Amino acid sequence: MVTRLRKISHTSQFRQCFDSILCKKYSTLTVAPGKDYKNLAAFHKKLTGSKRILALCGAGLSASSGLPTFRGAGGLWRTRNATEIATPEAFETDPGLVWLFYAYRRHMALKATPNLGHFALTALAENLPGFLCLTQNVDNLSIRAAHPPSQLRPLHGSLFNIKCSNPHCSYTEKNNTSDPLHPSLALAALDPAEDEPHPLLDPSHALEHMPAADLPACPECKALLRPDVVWYGEPLDEDMLTSVDEWIDDAQVDLVLVIGTSAVVWPAAGYIERARGRKTSVVTINPEAEKPDNLRKMRKRDFAFVGDAAVLLPQLLEPIIGKPGKNGTYKSKLTSTPNVGC
Ligand code: BV8
Ligand code: ZN
């Protein structure tokens, strides 16, 4: 029993939950933001003096690429709560509905293109080796903006990676962008007429129950395939979390960029305070950045910028990444050609 507790206590997920308790306990100690908390020049001074920057990104980063945020749509898909559908239990009960949910999000993400926010973060990574970007998004838009993989951590997986649902089978498929993924999911790849709701978003459009036999099956063990995303109640990839913990512990983190996230999902949200050191500034970039409950969490070195990440990030990061080119992307330091992404 003691050894098992010791083993668990070492996992970063235990640390995260422990941190979450600590944060709650000590959050009352925080002070109000400093007078310059929304002063661009003051932020640029901090930015140009920063060697190590961590970013935590959420659905808001992809909002102006046309992808709905979770809480934006009231967190609902049809009549179901997205956090309910993104669970092993929902897949157990109705794999057809869960597959339609992900097939629809694959279709929307494939139709979308990275925005200037994604490209600005790519340019920051190319100009600052000490930048690490954590994303909770599974839409692959940061990857399509050619964000250097060594400086990107897709914490919750990707809609375009597929794996077998049988825990004893190691079958996986990377970067599968076929749309529809499977004939049984053709409905998700439909593009309704301009003013027509997508049938999958229209609760009055009844969905037939789809027997598991009609759904994508594993070529190796015939069990059901599933999207390689992290569902609620499932652990994140331990190696990935350890690599983030080690990066944070390596040296002082000067800036933490909190971009387009409500920061309520753990352990991802835990990294904001986990990376905070005595001289760290946490910067919130969000239309709700000056909401009272966010101002309450701020410390005197922190910043808050209200607005669209795709508009603010180019302005905030300009001292390091310069101005975007005509085609809305940045000169890549790696290849003197603009990184057009894919
Ligand atoms: C686990 C993949 C344990 C799938 C996702 C500690 C405390 C409390 C709860 C927990 C805890 N530890 C664990 C839990 C439980 C749970 C959790 O966090 N629950 C929450 C809801 C309370 N966590 C888990 O279950 C995790 N697993 O703990 O396992 C374990 C350990 C060992 C062994 C076994 C088990 C797994 C969590 C991962 C779930 N998967 N995604 C999928 O996508 O379908 S989470 C998913 O939802 C996203 O990835 C993202 O993380 C989250 C959505 O949040 P956001 O991205 O922030 O989006 P949101 O809509 O909320 O907010 C958008 C924001 O953008 C808003 O603020 C808005 O104002 C802003 N915005 C809007 N427009 C713009 C903008 N900002 C800028 N510009 C704009 N234009
Ligand atoms: Zn299999």
Image (cartoon, grey):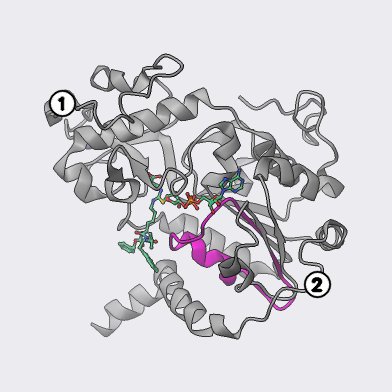
Residue 108 position by quadrant: top left
Q: Position of residue 184 (x, y in %)?
A: 23, 20
- Magenta region: 257-282
Q: Relative to residue 52, is residue 86 depicted above or below?
A: above
Q: Secondary structure at mark 1?
A: loop
Separation of marks 2 and 1 at Cα, in angstroms: 57 Å
Identify the residue under disc 1.
Answer: 208
Q: Amino acid at mark 2?
A: Lys
Q: Relative to residue 104, is residue 284 depicted above or below?
A: below
Q: Position of residue 272 (x, y in %)?
A: 58, 66
Asked whether residue 156 is in view, the answer is yes
Say whether mark 1 is within 8 Å of ligand 1: no
- Mark 1, residues whose alpha carbon is within 10 Å: few (<14), some, or many (≥20)? few
Q: Amino acid at mark 1?
A: Glu
The residue sitting at 28% across, 50% down in the picture is 84
In front: 236, or 309?
Answer: 309
The quadrant of the image that shows the C terminus is top right
Quadrant of the displayed image that contains ligand 1: bottom left
In front: 4, or 33?
Answer: 33
The residue sitting at 50% across, 23% down in the picture is 111
Q: Secondary structure at mark 2?
A: loop
